[in-house]
Image: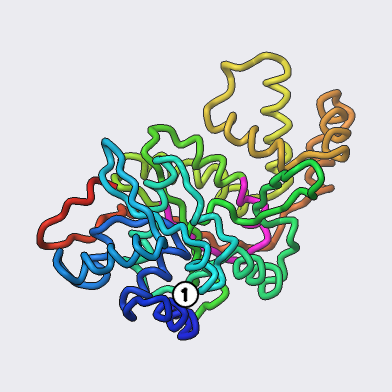
Amino acid sequence: MNISPVHLDALQALGYTEAEARFLYIVATHSGYFVARQFLTFTGTHWGQRTATFWNKLHTKKHARTERFPKSGTVYHLFSRRLYRQIDRENIRNRRQHEIEYIHRRIGMLDFVLSNPQWKYLETEPEKVSFFRDQLKVPIHFLPSKIYHGQRTSQPTIRYFVDKSPMFLAGDACPTVVTFTYLQGREASLTEFVHHLEDYLALFRQLSAFRFLYLARVDCHFEKAKELFDSLVTIPLGSDVSLDVLRYFQIRKAWDLGRYTSLTEADLIFRNQAKARFAGQRFEHLYRGWKAGRVADSEVRHDFGGSSRHVAVHFAAEVLCRPKVSGHETEGKP
């Protein structure tokens, strides 16, 4: 992680020490929220005059607010537009207030970044867009996006990578291989993880290689997450497209005919993913002809064929631990 001296100088000009400036830059860029143990670990300090001075500066300068939650303890939120402007992050959404579940996830992401400072992170939306569009030559419409509608008189805004999950390049030997991350929240379901993979699948298809790191506080979902990733990403990316089309047609036909008991959970997951992948008039016309017996399996194989393009995909799951701090802690549970 290389922080520009210009940004450090800009934060120090607001009255912070170099260590405090580095910490604030990382928080503002990757989270917006932090808890006391993260600052203590980063600076290698204990509770005392130095930490009290830091908290006082944040509050008297109106750069951060303290938020207390009954079951989650004390959280600090960097919200100052001026502070974000100092590091060219004025329009980042981290300075806005959010619900507690969102805050928990941001603090978890900050734990990961603070524990892995060796990586070169793609820190901002423009930096991520530029990397994929300009360096990897991925058309922008393949990037995960969301449309935000403003006032009646304003134009809708398209934002990219709105989940803000850490994304980084590991090592100089393969600088164009990016690692995507996903942090499992406290919810018991993996539905949000499935939606996340579906949002990114169009981008994954444009890459020759990438890594994916699934993060969670506990390992109870690791096996299921791997199964879902293989079903939604690894297998489709490494498979013969014609076989995928035929499998989709077979599952869709069974569904249309009401033969629900013949379909497995994997079939249903594949069907939901394939509906978006094989959408459009061409596939609808082909499906109707195949279902009616006018189009044979061999014709589908001939039309789509097998792809010789190889996509190198690596999935890993990792327990996200909280860095331990010796001494007295009072910040709570996040």
Q: Is residue 322 magenta?
A: no
Colouring rule applied to residues: rainbow
The residue beneath circle 1 is 120
Q: Which of the image's four quarters has the N terminus?
A: bottom left
Name the residue: 14% across, 67% down: 48
Name the residue: 51% across, 73% down: 87
Residue 172 appears left or right of 48:
right
| Residue 226 image offset from top left, x and y in percent | 43, 46
| Residue 304 image offset from top left, x and y in percent | 79, 49
Name the residue: 64% across, 64% down: 207
Residue 232 sits above or below residue 296 on the image: below
Front-most of 48 and 56?
56
Query: Residue 255's image quarter?
Result: top right
Q: Is residue 209 magenta?
A: yes
In the rendered image, the residue lying farthest to the left is 327
Query: Residue 285's image quarter?
Result: top right
Front-most of 297 and 164?
164
Front-most of 260 and 80?
80
Query: Residue 68's image quarter?
Result: top left
| Residue 233 image offset from top left, x and y in percent | 57, 49
Q: Amino acid at mark 1?
A: Lys
| Residue 30 image offset from top left, x and y in percent | 45, 62
Residue 293 appears left or right of 35:
right
Counting labels gives 1
Residue 108 in view, yes or no: no
Name the residue: 56% across, 72% down: 88
In the rendered image, the residue lying farthest to the top is 258
Residue 123 in view, yes or no: yes
Residue 126 appears left or right of 3:
right
Front-most of 255 and 157?
157
Q: Which residues are magenta?
A: 199-214
Q: Residues within 10 Å of mark 1 (few under 14, many from 20)?
A: some
